[in-house]
Image: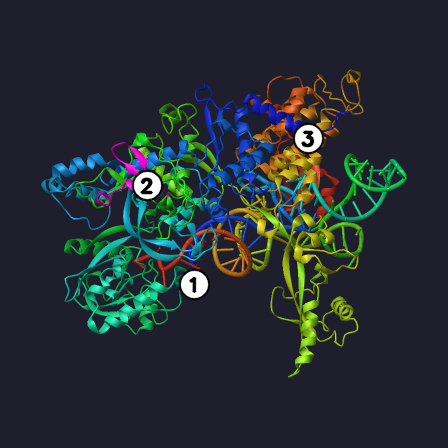
Amino acid sequence: MSKYHFNDIEDKWQKYWAKNQTFKAENKSEKPKYYVLDMFPYPSGAGLHVGHPLGYIASDIYTRYKRHQGFNVLHPQGYDSFGLPAEQYAIQTGQHPAKTTEENIARYREQLDKLGFSFDWSREVRTSNPEYYKWTQWIFLQLFDSWYDKDQNKALAIEELRVVFSSEGNIHVNAVCDEGIELFTASEWLDFSETKKQEILLKYRLTYLAETEVNWCPQLGTVLANDEIVNGVSERGGYPVVRKKMKQWSMRITAYAQRLLDGLDKIDWPQPLKDSQTNWIGRSKGSSVTFNVKDHDAKIDVFTTRPDTIFGVSFMTLAPEHDLVSKITTAEQKEAVENYIEATAKRSERERMADVKTITGVFTGAYAEHPFTGDSIPVWIGDYVLAGYGTGAVMSVPCGDQRDYDFAKHFNLPIPNIFKDADISKEAYSDKDNTIITNSDFLNDLNYKQATEKIIAALEEKGVGEGKINYRLRDAVFSRQRYWGEPFPIYYKDGMPHPIPTECLPLRLPEVEKYLPTEEGEPPLGRAENWSWDEKNKKIVSNENVSPSAVEGSSNENGIYPLELNTMPGWAGSSWYFFRYMEDEKRDEVFASKEALNYWKNVDLYIGGSEHATGHLLYSRFWVKFMHDRGLVPVEEPFKKLINQGMILGESAFVYAISFFQSKKIEDNDKELNKYLEFLNELPDLFLSRNKIKEGMKLDSMDLVSVSDYPYKDLYNFLKNEINDRDIDANEFDFNVMPIHADVSLVNTSNVLDVEGFKSWREDFKNAKFILEEDGSYKVGREVEKMSKSKYNVVNPDDICNQYGADTLRMYEMFLGPLEQAKPWNTAGITGVHGFLKKLWKLYHSPFEGCKGDVSQSQEPNDFYVSDEAASKDSLKTLHKTIKKTQEDIEHFSFNTSVSSFMIAVNELTSQNCNSREVLEPLAILISPYAPHIAEELWQKLGHSESISIAPFPKFDQQYLVESSKEYPISFNGKMRFTLELPLDLNKEEIESAVMAHEKTAQYLEGRTPKKVIIVPGKIVNIVG
RNA sequence: GCUCGAGUGGCGGAAUUGGUAGACGCGCUGGAUUCAAAAUCCAGUGUUUUAGGACGUGCGGGUUCGAUUCCCGCCUCGAGUACCA
């Protein structure tokens, strides 16, 4: 008999798809295109758990649906294969990261293949492959070769800048560039040495080398970008991060701040994701104000969002790192200021964050001059002012800003009030909307908006400020002091970076004998012996050939120069990979051909986690905008629609370890004390079953509980037994309870622990003892947490596939709940979905009693059998209802509800004894995006020789759903009391008379006359009264 | 603190523009089948009750004939962000 042998079926079709290249996308097609992409995985050594494929399943369903709809779909997959974990592993084991990466990828691929995804693997990319990173390096050089023109609001070739410099100097150049660039004329430019020219150009390049304050992580031995730091520690590993000045490559992403903000309106992304990018970019509108420092030839520039409060300034605060500090500090204050700077530099970022309440600062002794009143304003330094934001200086208006207020209170500085009728005795008044300015000269009696307009005009007229927009977004540090990343195609000549000619790319990672920094503190590439560039012969040569004179730029140089030792960060390769997939044939010649780029354009649907909100998703948008400016790609946004899949959480299991402590008062009696300590030392590990823990008891704490007071006597009895005939009192003990993760595979669905399995699970639990429930079992506690190896709550998809099949796993993951929501995994529930697939299988096989058609054709009971006779009206209704629902659900990414509707359909068709081809054929297509293997198998049995994957999606026909009557809910005062079946063609009056004539109506009215009768034909009847 | 999201049975979750709350599945209870188990099938399953009903979508108000859905005010949980001038 033909049972549902899912393992055989799935194996068969996975082989068939691979062999026939069923899912290969065409770059030339009559069909409309559609591009579905998953955020590509980092191939970690741990392999996949059931949480990882969630997004892949969703995108695969959508992909397969689009194919049924007649689209030419591009659905590729690859690996983000450069990264820290492989390198950390290499440091520990000495294995080349390329090797472990290769192994991890093989494992990932095997796991992915088992799930039946319809990826076009012929287009796979790996960011660590030289054929791929060749183009990452190439794009880097394009950035190196570009500057940002604010007038045209786009990136232009650096060559154009040289032309402008040669003809008119830099006076009229309006570029996004380093601050404080000296002005020069055309003739001065032409007289500059080439090195000087390079130095100047570097200040304009979109990727540039500069001494910047970076986040340095000593444990990882590398700098980190802002988005790689979570709560003041490194995202990977959780190591502390300190601030340090270093010469680093940076990306001038700030040039694109406004466009990155504006572009958000044009893309269909989840609002929370857009919000977090908006916040990250952090646009604020205000103005700059310049204050002269008294008795010094110095000016303090500040940025403020409240220029209207300028008459409320009572002091100024500089960041301790501010350049002016050393210049303006008076002799008397010198020592205090220096001590303060030293103290703040020592504090790590984390300490500064954890401790926002302590107010610290020092007076510099200097005074600034108020631009309007001419008053003297004391200049302080304080670490509440950040060096990296705005100008690193603020005009402090204590009456309007809470931090300034707190600072003023703490140091007894004056708090002048410039707000009409505002109470500032307890806190600052920061309510912009109800502001009326007073005590402010020409701003008196104006509101916030009027005052702001007027003061900006006044500042501009006086030449001491202007309206300005400020962004929180910083330029992105692009150097990493690591091995396993893309080498920069850069060498250093006379201290200036020079690009490797593009025809020489890729610049391959050199071999090193260790993956650690050098003894001199250089990055790992400093260990490479052949890591110098021969400019004349255009090749990599041994470092021995570099003559010291070459580095210093003397005249007798030999043309051989040292190569850059840093590598690129993880986001380099992931910022453009979606374009690489578009190209299938000319990958050697271009990163992607014009034809491919113009055909596929951008990703129509992108699915991945929300953790990439301010990293990958922002950098990709930046690179795409840049590439668009330089004419490399036709689009300005990479991902048209984006969906964040929610995390699948694990259900951790806990056992409860008991620790005993002696509580007997023993005074100066070592012997007595030792007796107890010795006994405690010899006690085996003890675990308490879940229900033996007193309700409300504190776990994981040092609050001890007395054994003799504990309501369950098991602990006392345990001790008594262990004490045996020793001279120790079992009542003289306290204990506490520590929950410990147990591996979920040791626990069954009723939360009962496999005690023997647990003892052999870990060596240190070998002799463990257990206090069991009354029924003799050990029950674990459960808690929903992130799925992770360290919490022992990982469920492996391979196991699920072996036991239930990939189709079941796919459907179950969808069935768990809405795609975007986080939800706990519970293996127990999978039987429902598995049972559904069995029922579906049966629908095409078992000749039911009373089924239509000639049953004798079927040779055996349970053989495949589908009738060619017309389906019943009910079955057609079921089918079309399901077509409608499925289509709507897929288009709204509501995959959980469509699984329900399949279940309903199969339940209904089963009870209708339906076995008509007319219904069962389209049903197979409907289900095929979700459960492709079983659908292919049924499709083949239905007599088709081609894959079901391109069968046209069934057409919904309204006529099968037309009802002639409706079961009306009859409500009294809004409460439904009974239902009444009435023809749908009745008008309001007819419905009313039918309802009023009904005996139950009279019963519920109890003789009252209805005040009102609400009738919505086809919906409801509500009687009020 | 700020921004965003979410609160519905024992559990995961349904409910189109306000119109029969709890679809579907798990779990649980009872039954059929079986030597027994698995598997399968059937029935029941929000709470409460004096069996008519009453109460029920985080809490308190409001709009409405009618509110899980709309409005106002709170509470709790989760995510992001963190002195941003």
What residue lies at 67% left-to-right and 81% top-to-bottom? Answer: A666
Q: Pick the quarter of the image with the N terminus of chain A.
A: top right
Disc 3 or disc 2, which is closer to the eye?
A: 3
Residue placed farthest to the front in the image? A544
Q: Which mark is residue A354?
A: 1
The numbered mark, 3 or 1, whose residue comes first in the sequence reads 3
**A388 in the magenta segment:** no
The residues bearing labels 2 and 1 have C-alpha atoms spaced at a distance of 34 Å
In-image side of A905 versus A82 (left or right)? right
Magenta span: A528-550
Q: Nearer the viewer, residue A915 or A787?
A: A787
Q: Secondary structure at mark 2?
A: helix
Q: Amino acid at mark 2?
A: Arg
**Is residue A429 visible from the viewing direction of this image?**
no
In-image side of A931 versus A309 (left or right)? right
User: Mark 2 highlights which residue?
Assistant: A259
Q: Chain of mark 1?
A: A
Tag 3–tag 2 contact (CB < 8 Å) = no
Q: Chain of mark 3?
A: A
In the depicted structure, whether residue A948 falls above or below residue A367: above
User: Mark 3 highlights which residue?
Assistant: A6
Q: Nearer the viewer, residue A121 or A90?
A: A90
**A532 in the magenta segment:** yes
